[in-house]
Image (cartoon, rainbow, N blue to C red):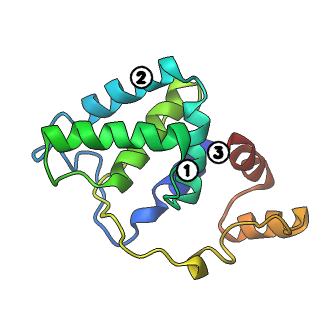
């Protein structure tokens, strides 16, 4: 159950797009292979990359720093060379996060692709959707329950990043 809710959180980003696991089948057939090769090499050299990428994905704020930025950038470059102007950073982040989480023993879940990158970043979209440093435990539990998550799932997601 937790895997399905985590998967729900992880593809909640593309609400308006028609998302499908084989979105790049015709336009970038090596999409999954390129992602897998890139993250495997990065995970071997930096075993903490899964946690950093999950943290980045959960917040999806693109204040990318450190190794999480590196793994997304490496994937972006490889995919641009193979399939210019085709794959979104949002889908790279989604696929890389799922593959890294699975690689380190987390649940496998289906990734639906087809997100488009946003060009607007507004702090007002964050307020009320994520706990802050001043949010109490009870408020955090309530926030996650409003989004359909049990307290155990809250602990898993907060602890994972």
Q: Residue at x 51, y 41 (%)?
A: 68
Cα separation, mark 2 vs mark 3, equals: 25 Å
Q: Residue at x 66, y 64 (%)?
A: 148
Q: Viewer-proximal residue, 69 or 28? A: 69
Residue 129 sits in which quadrant?
bottom right
The answer to whether residue 108 is left or right of residue 128 is left
Q: Residue furthest front?
A: 66
Residue count near mark 2 (Cα–Cα under 10 Å), binned few <14, some 14–19, many ≥20: some
- Residue at mark 2: 40
Mark before the other along the chain sequence, 2 or 1: 2
Q: Position of residue 61 (x, y in %)?
A: 53, 62
Residue count near mark 3 (Cα–Cα under 10 Å), binned few <14, some 14–19, many ≥20: some
Q: Is residue 66 in view from this perspective? A: yes
The quarter in which the C terminus is drawn is top right
Residue 125 sits in which quadrant?
bottom right
Q: Is residue 77 above or below residue 119?
A: above
Mark before the other along the chain sequence, 3 or 1: 3
Q: Are marks 3 and 1 in contact (CB under 8 Å)?
A: no
Q: Is residue 76 above or below residue 141?
A: above
- Residue at mark 1: 56
- Residue at mark 3: 2
Residue count near mark 1 (Cα–Cα under 10 Å), binned few <14, some 14–19, many ≥20: many
Q: Position of residue 27 (x, y in %)?
A: 11, 47
Mark before the other along the chain sequence, 2 or 3: 3
Dot 3: element: helix
Q: Is residue 38 above or below residue 62?
A: above
């Amino acid at each position: 159950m937790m895997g399905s809710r985590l998967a729900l959180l992880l593809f909640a980003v593309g609400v308006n797009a028609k998302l499908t696991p084989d979105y790049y089948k015709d336009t970038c057939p090596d999409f999954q292979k390129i992602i897998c090769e890139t993250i495997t090499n990065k995970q071997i050299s930096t075993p903490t990359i899964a946690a950093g990428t999950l943290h980045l994905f959960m917040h999806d704020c693109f204040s990318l720093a450190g190794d999480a930025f590196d793994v997304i950038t490496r994937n972006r470059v490889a995919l641009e060379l193979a399939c210019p102007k085709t794959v979104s950073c949002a889908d790279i982040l989604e696929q890389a996060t799922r593959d890294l989480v699975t690689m380190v023993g987390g649940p496998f879940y289906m990734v639906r692709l087809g997100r488009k990158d946003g060009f607007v970043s507004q702090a007002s979209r964050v307020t009320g959707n994520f706990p802050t440093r001043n949010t109490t435990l009870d408020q955090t539990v309530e926030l996650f329950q409003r989004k359909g998550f049990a307290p155990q799932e809250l602990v898993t997601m907060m602890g994972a990043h």
